[in-house]
Image: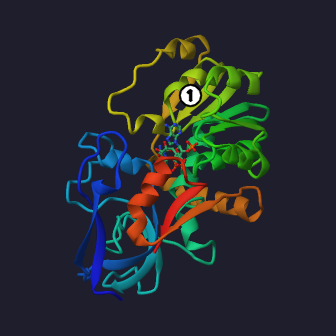
């Protein structure tokens, strides 16, 4: 075990797209557990879009990271020291370690994970927060029925690629948008999407959506917001269900975008639009994980991970994910 704890701290609040210099690598002391605490050595870290919001000094559903504070985030790793009655040295756990090599905790927000069930990194992806976001945010809010047309924006990401596969399991026609031809090909060939388009090379979103969803959209799972969601609103069927999971096209804007005001579409189609945070289903996480795990084992759900090697590359991994360079769930390996 090393005698320092390397940490990525927030050095500056970005305006617009974040830069590597918004973070600084610092060395802290190795934490020692007090009574009721344990220390986790991270093996894989997650980088997620929500972290961009934590860099802003603004009120959201969680407080911002302080300047000079350690960036927030989840990791999977091993307990290396413990004075906690429920956690022993060697246990594999997942929780909010933050962007640092060792996390000290009383266990709040941590859970044990079984590496016999899946590789550790899967607990940051298909069997972790993104997988459960897809499972509950799609199935509970969109309530997909056989024969429905499902449209997923940000379809090739950690969450989106799973949502489409859940739609296929429910017997729906599934269409998605993603930022490269390779991602669209992957969605159709590997994830069972019926159609997908590259929103960067096909910028008339409404025209392509009408072409690929000739019967209109019954369920929308929104990862991106902005102009894509405007086009979807113009394509919905009566009693459509729209699940607002993320708005990544807006996260790096310096000024809020002005858009068409399309809520009349909800009115005339008697549609439902609902935002959610995955923590809503905290009491049902094990149900979701068990079901996702079974579908993975049965080959009904496929997933891919994009692994960046080395803790020193955390900011690089975060920025490449925001740029769309990730193919599947972006994680960092120690
Ligand atoms: P991800 O999709 O694996 O990675 C982010 C992707 O966003 C990139 O790969 C990129 O793919 C796309 N993107 C970046 N800028 C974009 C833009 N301007 N317009 C359209 N797409 C853009 O990340 P994820 O973890 O699965 O998260 C997906 C969404 O779900 C995010 O909005 C996130 O905030 C949200 N989320 C919400 C919850 C919740 O509880 N509500 C939980 C988890 C995630 P392309 O190549 O396709 O551009």
The structure residue drawn at horizontal position 73% and vertical position 30%, both measured from the top left corner, is 149
Q: Nearer the viewer, residue 208 or 105?
A: 208
The structure residue drawn at horizontal position 65% and vertical position 50%, both measured from the top left corner, is 162
Mark 1 sits near ligand 1, with its Cβ under 8 Å away: yes
Which quadrant, please, contains the C terminus?
bottom left
Q: Is residue 71 above or below residue 168?
A: below
Image x and y of residue 171, in percent: 79, 40
Which quadrant, please, contains the N terminus?
bottom left
Q: Is residue 273 toward the left or the right of residue 23 in the image? A: right
Dot 1 corresponds to which residue?
228
Q: Nearer the viewer, residue 173 or 270?
A: 173
Q: Is residue 213 above or below residue 163?
A: above
Q: Secondary structure at mark 1?
A: helix
Q: Quadrant of residue 153?
A: top right
Image x and y of residue 108, in percent: 35, 65
Q: Nearer the viewer, residue 308 or 224?
A: 308
Q: Is residue 106 above or below residue 191?
A: below
The structure residue drawn at horizontal position 21% and vertical position 54%, both measured from the top left corner, is 66
How many marks can you see?
1
The structure residue drawn at horizontal position 36% and vertical position 74%, both measured from the top left corner, is 101
Image x and y of residue 39, in percent: 33, 79
Q: Residues within 10 Å of mark 1 (few under 14, many from 20)?
A: many
Q: What colour scheme does the image use?
A: rainbow
Q: Is residue 128 toward the left or the right of residue 217 in the image? A: left
Q: Is residue 27 toward the left or the right of residue 187 in the image? A: left
Q: Is residue 270 visible?
A: yes
Q: Is residue 105 visible?
A: no
Image x and y of residue 92, in percent: 48, 78
């Amino acid at each position: 075990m090393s005698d320092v704890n390397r940490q990525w701290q927030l050095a500056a609040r970005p305006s617009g797209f974040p830069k590597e210099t918004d973070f600084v690598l610092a060395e802290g002391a190795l934490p020692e557990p007090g009574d009721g605490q344990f220390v986790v050595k991270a093996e894989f870290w997650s980088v997620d879009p929500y972290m961009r919001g934590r860099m802003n000094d603004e009120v959201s559903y969680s407080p911002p990271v302080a300047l000079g504070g350690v960036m927030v985030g989840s990791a999977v790793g091993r307990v290396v020291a413990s004075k906690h009655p429920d956690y022993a040295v060697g246990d594999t756990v997942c929780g909010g370690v933050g962007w640092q090599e060792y996390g000290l905790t009383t266990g709040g927000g941590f859970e044990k994970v079984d590496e016999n069930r899946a590789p550790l990194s899967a607990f940051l992806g298909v069997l972790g927060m993104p997988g459960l976001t897809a499972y509950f945010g799609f199935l509970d809010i969109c309530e997909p029925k056989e024969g429905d047309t499902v449209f997923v924006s940000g379809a090739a990401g950690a969450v989106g690629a799973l949502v489409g596969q859940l739609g296929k399991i429910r017997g729906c026609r599934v269409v998605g948008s993603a930022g490269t031809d390779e991602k669209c090909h992957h969605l159709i060939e590997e994830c069972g999407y019926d159609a997908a388009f590259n929103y960067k090379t096909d910028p008339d979103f409404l025209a392509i959506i009408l072409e690929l969803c000739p019967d209109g959209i019954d369920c929308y799972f929104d990862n991106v917001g902005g102009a894509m969601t405007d086009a979807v609103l113009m394509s919905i069927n009566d009693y459509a269900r729209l699940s607002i999971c993320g708005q990544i096209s807006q996260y790096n804007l310096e000024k809020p975008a002005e858009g068409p005001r399309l809520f009349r579409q909800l009115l005339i189609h008697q549609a439902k639009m609902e935002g959610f945070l995955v923590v809503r289903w905290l009491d049902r996480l094990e149900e979701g994980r068990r079901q996702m795990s079974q579908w993975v084992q049965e080959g009904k759900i496929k997933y891919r991970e994009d692994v960046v090697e080395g803790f020193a590359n955390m900011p690089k991994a975060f920025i490449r994910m925001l740029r769309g360079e990730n193919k599947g769930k972006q994680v960092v390996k120690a």
